[in-house]
Amino acid sequence: MMRNIGLFAVMAGLIALVGFIQSWSLALAILNLCLISAVMSLGVNIQWGYAGLLNVGVMGFAALGGLAAVLVSMPPVTEAWSNGGGRLLLAAAWFALVVVAVLFARSRLRGAIRSWSIVLLIAVGYFVLRHVADPAVAAIESTNPASTGYLGGLGAPIMFSWLLGGVFAAGAAWLIGKVALGLRSDYLAIATLGISEIVIAVIKNEDWLARGVKNVAGLPRPVPYEVELQQAPWVQDWAQSTGMSLIEMSSVIVKLSYAGLFVVVLLALIWLCETALRSPWGRMLRAIRDNETAAAAMGKDVKARHLQVFVLGSAVIGIAGAMLTTLDGQFTPGSYQPLRFTFLIWVMVIVGGSGNNWGAVLGGFVVWFFWVEAEPLGLWLMELITSGMAEDNALRLHLIESAAHMRLMTMGVVLLLVLRFSPRGLIPER
Amino acid sequence: MDLLNALVLLANFMLVPALTYGCQLALGALGVTLIYSILRFSNFAHGETMAFGTAATILLTWWLQSMGVSFGPLPTALIAMPFGALAAVLLLLASDRVVYRFHRRQRATPVLLLIASLGVMFFYNGLIRFIIGPDDRIFTDGARFIVSAREFKAMTGLSQGLAIKTTQGITVLMTVILVAALFWFLTYTRTGKSMRAYSDNRDLALLSGINPDTVVRVAWILTAILATVAGVLYGLDKSFKPFTYLQILLPIFAAAIVGGLGSPLGAVAGGFIIAFSEVAVTFAYKRVIGYIVPPEWAPDTLVQFLSTDYKFAVSFTILVIVLLIRPTGIFRGQTL
């Protein structure tokens, strides 16, 4: 116990060190992303640590959370709705109808008739869908494309999107879990990789939904703006009494408010996770993870429990995704790289200690901290190594240039080292 | 005449590219399937192995080109390829020695090996960017076409041309040779037979005196060769960019699973199924239909089922269908 508190204290010290050496604004920016990473790795830990399920599509679920942030918070574009909204709703209704018809055919019909009717339903459904949806999409996307060109959102407070993001991600997880769970364990990994690629492709290309790669900027914030704060007398007083510049002070206050919100979410989730893990449900999950056959023999429904855990974990990742987009204040689908950042989350869970919620949180902090600070450190290291060489030495230039690529490589090595020499991570499972 | 034109158009933009792409996927999927059937895990580092073999080949090709060596009408990269493959073999054997062997001896679960392969993947990822950089590289040389569109038009008098690039011809030829050699090796040689036995029933194979270390080593060597050839052919046909090799991982896995993970025949079939459906679904049929139907019926849209941005969705959809209907794949995988 003392050791764990010590580890968190060291982490806090490191962030404070950045505050003293670099700047407090940067330290808090790192802290905020550490908190979000911690939530994400908590989600992965639920799947991997509790149940041994492998999710390689973390970024896809995070992107769904980000999408929720846009759909909840942006004001609706009434012009686009009147241009093509009704027709698009009609298309959505048709899509739902086709899905229901296919499911009905799948459950009620048998043999060759079943296969052919499903194929026919999908083919007819597809062509009618295109016929109905295409003009609507074109109309929406041509509505003032430079600034909107999409349907907009609900215009509700952005904090609601944290819930909706979780719901979106849970829905996607349910679909994929239905297909891939109960089969061999690697299938889930490959299927999640696939779904995340597709989610990101859809968000990038369907401009009517969230403007695609044109990005949605200027999302409403749950906290005050810097410019407003700089006008407030109490901020000016604080800035004077601490000796910070007014701009620095306002940015610190904004980031602190975000950090406060994130801490509340993180603590609530940890409490829920810890309670769940200590409950009979948690014991059952660990029993299933450690020996599926034995658990099944005891009458536990392994597949249903796996689906449950997979959906819950993905929902947590979706929440983190919505938080991330809220913090950024913009939604940039191009920045979601399916494998790269998923891998980072995985390193967090394994370094921290899979199966232990506090471990996953610590892993999120440690790995994100070093991920951000590795760039200046790596550059400094490369310059140190090559300091004996001439200024324009080809090898020196090459080494300094490739320092940026070394981060992922280092993460790969860290993962392999932990897997081999300390597979239980920083804070082992109890 | 118009019907012939439509067929040539289809062949030129659909059949030939899909055949080439199918060959590249088949070679990639064969590597995944081999590792799966011997070592029992899905090797996520396979895409990066392809990229590494290709990067090594490109570096050597540049060196050869600077020395003035050329391969006549064929790309110089073909001379460099065996050495690129050798580099990949060494890399994979070293990774096995340093990473996988330890977990194998611990009798780790397949999922743990999969995670280790993710780590290895990102290690390779950095390594490749370190030695060749993240940029797009075009390294093909020699004659560009076997049959160019203009020659074909002059030969047949049709208004549509059929172009066959040299790289496409090489891809198909190399794939046929390599796949035939692999099947011959697995079916008739002593080592190949022992590999099949090992993948079929590990305990029985060990009992009958098969050396597991040899089997594993040969599996890695074959995988490295297959991966390098697949990567070089893909790079010659399109261009070499490390990032695309990360993205090709999904179609390769889909091909291996659709055919039946662990079945070499299935990997080849799966590669072609994925490639043909991907191209067929993202192909714009407007001009083909324009040739067949009377002019007044000609469509004004592209008649494209899905935009090319969604080509991953095609591999994924096929994967889902197979998982739903027949999770073992078309050729009942699991063993060699």
Image (cartoon, rainbow, N blue to C red):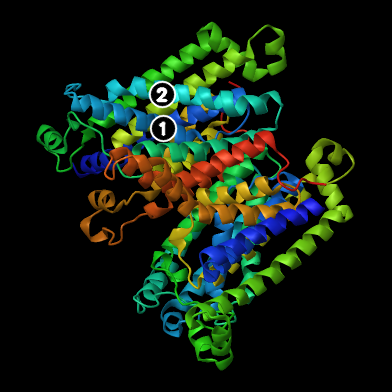
Residue for point 40% across, 48% down: B281
Residue for point 26% across, 44% down: A392
Mark closest to the chain's N terminus, 2 or 1:
1
State left or right for residue B97 relative to residue B140. Answer: right
**Residue type, numbered disc 1:** Phe
Q: Nearer the viewer, residue B229 or B155?
A: B229
Q: Secondary structure at mark 1?
A: helix
Residue A48: where, in percent of width, then height? 70, 47
**Residue type, numbered disc 2:** Ala
Q: Is residue A179 visible?
A: yes
Distance in Å between CA atoms under marks 2 and 1: 8 Å
Question: Are dots 2 and 1 in contact, CB under 8 Å?
Answer: yes
Few, some or many C-alpha atoms within 10 Å of disc 2 (few <14, some 14-19, many ≥20)? Answer: many
Q: Quadrant of residue B78?
A: top left
Q: Is residue A284 above or below residue A25?
A: above
Q: Is residue B43 above or below residue B178?
A: below
Residue that numbered label 2 is attached to: B87
Few, some or many C-alpha atoms within 10 Å of disc 1 (few <14, some 14-19, many ≥20)? Answer: many
Q: Nearer the viewer, residue A206 or B111?
A: B111
Which dot marks residue B52?
1
Residue A283: where, in percent of width, then height? 86, 49
Q: Is residue B241 visible?
A: no
Q: Is residue B222 above or below residue B210?
A: below
Q: Quadrant of residue B119?
A: top right
Which dot marks residue A95?
none
State left or right for residue A182 relative to residue B90. Answer: right
Q: Nearer the viewer, residue B9 or A159?
A: A159
Residue for point 30% across, 31% down: B58
Q: Nearer the viewer, residue A289 or A421?
A: A421
